[in-house]
Image (tube, rainbow, N blue to C red):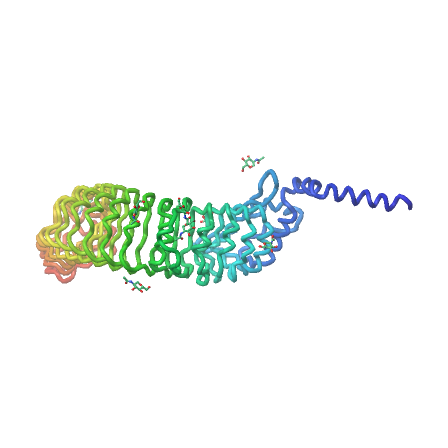
């Protein structure tokens, strides 16, 4: 009886003494920290799991070790949870198999996971107000809440400044419409290298900071602000990152006025998308200084004037899209110097003059669209030198003369549209050599003569439109050999009517 309280005291003392280490021994056996395990179970209680994605999470004896649960990764030394990846997997039809829940209620459970470095909840059905408690996860290096379709919103991004190690942040489709101080919040993130804020209803920057105080931040390399309502007031903030940006997407915003010369100072930029804005003024010559650029999209703006010769200096460019602007003048011969270009779209502008012979020098080009302009003259023979071309669209111009025999040399062409021009002469026999062609539209021209027998060699052709020409004679028997043909339009010619598919 007398020793009993003493014993009790000793036991309590030992228990207190070994509380931390003993627990750790226990953890080493189960591999997982109990406190974090409870936080995960609490998280699970807060979500609707229609697809049983969290079936490995539970209390049963064989599920003790939460480090073995789906989407969970622990540090193998400390047992602490360092990665939680619950992005919705896609089913066979490409639809996400989402978890559903209120992110506001899940916040406290997530905030328990203090050692987390990577959190990915993308493509789920989480909604509600984004809890600022996520700012407690001070070890986070990547946070991906993008593409949730449950109307997630966040009115204030100040909590991000508590995440000094964060390098990758994806909040695509989170409603940030009220987060007016977002630029300041981003400026306070010293390690951020990749930021995705497209479709976030991001408000325009309130212009308070004068451009003269700008200093370049060093880390931000990938910036996606597409599909928001941003205006030209973004520039002072944006050019703060001039020396670090590699990938910049500002497409589908409300930028207007001229494109600032300052883009020419972004000397590390490889990808620039300014499409779908209201940009006017002529294209700055300064673009010629961007000698690291591989991808440039200025399409669907209001750009007037001519294409600068300086484009010829962009000798690293692989993708150039200027379609749907008001560009006029001639296509510069300097294009021949862009010997790395694989994709060129100048369609739906007001370009005049003839197609430069220099195009023959673009021997890396795979996609060329000059349709919907006012180009005249004949198609250069030099096209035969573009032996990598797979897509050629020259429709709706004023091209005349004959189709060059040299087309037979374009043995990689899959898509050819020359419709809506004034092309004359007969269809060259050389078409039979284009044995990779799947789509051919020569309609609405002034083509004469008969359809060449050589068409029978185009065994990959699926779509053929020769309507609205002045073709004569009979339809060649060789048509029977065009076994891939799914669509044929030959009307409005002077062809002899015959039974095409004789049995
Ligand atoms: C622990 O993790 C580190 C880094 O992930 C790995 O290199 C190492 O092999 C792991 N050790 C054990 C015992 O699994
Ligand atoms: C999160 O998961 C998605 C898959 O849905 C993946 O594409 C994305 O890269 C992941 N995010 C991070 C930061 O690793
Ligand atoms: C998170 O931080 C807030 C203060 O910023 C604090 O009140 C709260 O207790 C913290 N939560 C956790 C789980 O650490
Ligand atoms: C910008 O840099 C200059 C010199 O490098 C420094 O004197 C100035 O305080 C900096 N300004 C800001 C706003 O950081
Ligand atoms: C440029 O960056 C610095 C440091 O990140 C910041 O203090 C300054 O306010 C930024 N300037 C603008 C215009 O955002
Ligand atoms: C650009 O848009 C703003 C409104 O956002 C307007 O005040 C300004 O006049 C426009 N500038 C030009 C050059 O169209
Ligand atoms: C480009 O950078 C240079 C050197 O830093 C500077 O003198 C010039 O004003 C900048 N140009 C623009 C348009 O910002
Ligand atoms: C169709 O192809 C076969 C085999 O390649 C060939 O013998 C025949 O002459 C062709 N028919 C026509 C009408 O060209």
Q: In what quadrant of the picture does the C terminus appear?
A: bottom left
Number of marks present in the image shown = 0
Residue 40 vs residue 454, the one in the foreground: 40
Quarter occupied by residue 14: top right
Give the side of residue 19 with respect to residue 80, left or right: right
Residue 138 vs residue 449, the one in the foreground: 138
Q: Position of residue 498 (x, y in %)?
A: 14, 59
At a point 41% along the width and 61% down the height, the residue shown is 203
Give the side of residue 119 with respect to residue 20, left or right: left
Identify whether 76 is placed above or below 63.
Answer: above
Quarter occupied by residue 334: top left
Q: Position of residue 400 (x, y in %)?
A: 10, 54
Residue 133 vs residue 22, the one in the foreground: 133
Q: Position of residue 300 (x, y in %)?
A: 27, 58
Give the side of residue 245 with respect to residue 87, left or right: left
Q: Position of residue 349 (x, y in %)?
A: 20, 57
Residue 176 vs residue 94, the one in the foreground: 176
Residue 460 visible in the snapshot: no
Identify whether 97 is placed above or below 408.
Answer: below
Identify whether 76 is placed above or below 181.
Answer: above
Quarter occupied by residue 375: bottom left
Residue 330 visible in the snapshot: yes
Give the side of residue 18 with respect to residue 144, left or right: right
């Amino acid at each position: 009886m007398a020793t009993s309280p003493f014993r009790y005291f000793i036991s309590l003392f030992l228990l207190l003494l070994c509380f931390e280490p003993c627990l750790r021994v226990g953890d080493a056996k189960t591999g997982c920290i109990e406190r974090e395990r409870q936080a995960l179970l609490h998280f699970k209680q807060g979500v609707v799991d229609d697809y049983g994605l969290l079936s490995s999470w539970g209390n049963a004896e064989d599920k003790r070790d939460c480090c073995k649960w789906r989407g969970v990764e622990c540090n193998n030394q400390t047992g602490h949870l360092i990665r939680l990846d619950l992005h919705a997997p896609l089913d066979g039809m490409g639809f996400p198999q989402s978890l559903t829940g209120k992110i506001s209620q899940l916040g406290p459970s997530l905030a328990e996971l203090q050692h987390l470095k990577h959190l990915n909840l993308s493509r789920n059905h989480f909604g509600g107000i984004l809890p600022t408690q996520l700012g407690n996860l001070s070890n986070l290096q990547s946070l991906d809440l993008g593409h949730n379709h449950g109307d997630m919103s966040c009115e204030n991004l100040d909590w991000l400044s508590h995440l000094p190690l964060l390098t990758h942040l994806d909040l695509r489709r989170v409603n940030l419409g009220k987060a007016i101080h977002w630029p300041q919040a981003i400026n306070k993130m010293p390690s951020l290298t990749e930021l995705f804020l497209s479709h976030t209803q991001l408000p325009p920057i309130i212009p308070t900071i004068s451009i003269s105080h700008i200093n370049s931040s060093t880390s931000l390399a990938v910036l996606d602000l597409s599909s928001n309502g941003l205006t030209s007031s973004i520039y002072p903030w944006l050019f703060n990152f001039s020396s670090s940006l590699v990938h910049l997407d500002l497409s589908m915003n409300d930028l207007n006025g001229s494109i600032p010369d300052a883009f020419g100072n972004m000397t590390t930029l490889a990808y620039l998308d300014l499409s779908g804005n209201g940009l006017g003024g002529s294209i700055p010559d300064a673009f010629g200084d961007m000698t690291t650029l591989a991808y440039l999209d200025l399409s669907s703006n209001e750009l007037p004037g001519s294409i600068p010769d300086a484009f010829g200096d962009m000798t690293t460019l692989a993708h150039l899209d200027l379609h749907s602007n008001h560009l006029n003048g001639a296509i510069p011969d300097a294009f021949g110097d862009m010997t790395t270009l694989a994709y060129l779209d100048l369609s739906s502008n007001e370009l005049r003059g003839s197609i430069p012979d220099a195009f023959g020098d673009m021997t890396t080009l795979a996609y060329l669209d000059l349709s919907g302009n006012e180009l005249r003259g004949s198609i250069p023979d030099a096209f035969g030198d573009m032996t990598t071309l797979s897509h050629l669209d020259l429709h709706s111009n004023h091209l005349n003369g004959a189709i060059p025999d040299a087309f037979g040399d374009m043995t990689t062409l899959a898509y050819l549209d020359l419709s809506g021009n004034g092309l004359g002469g007969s269809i060259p026999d050389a078409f039979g050599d284009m044995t990779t062609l799947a789509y051919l539209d020569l309609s609405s021209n002034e083509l004469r003569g008969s359809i060449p027998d050589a068409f029978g060699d185009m065994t990959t052709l699926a779509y053929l439109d020769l309507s609205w020409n002045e073709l004569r004679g009979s339809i060649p028997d060789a048509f029977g050999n065009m076994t891939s043909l799914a669509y044929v339009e030959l009307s409005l010619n002077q062809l002899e009517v015959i039974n095409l598919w004789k049995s």
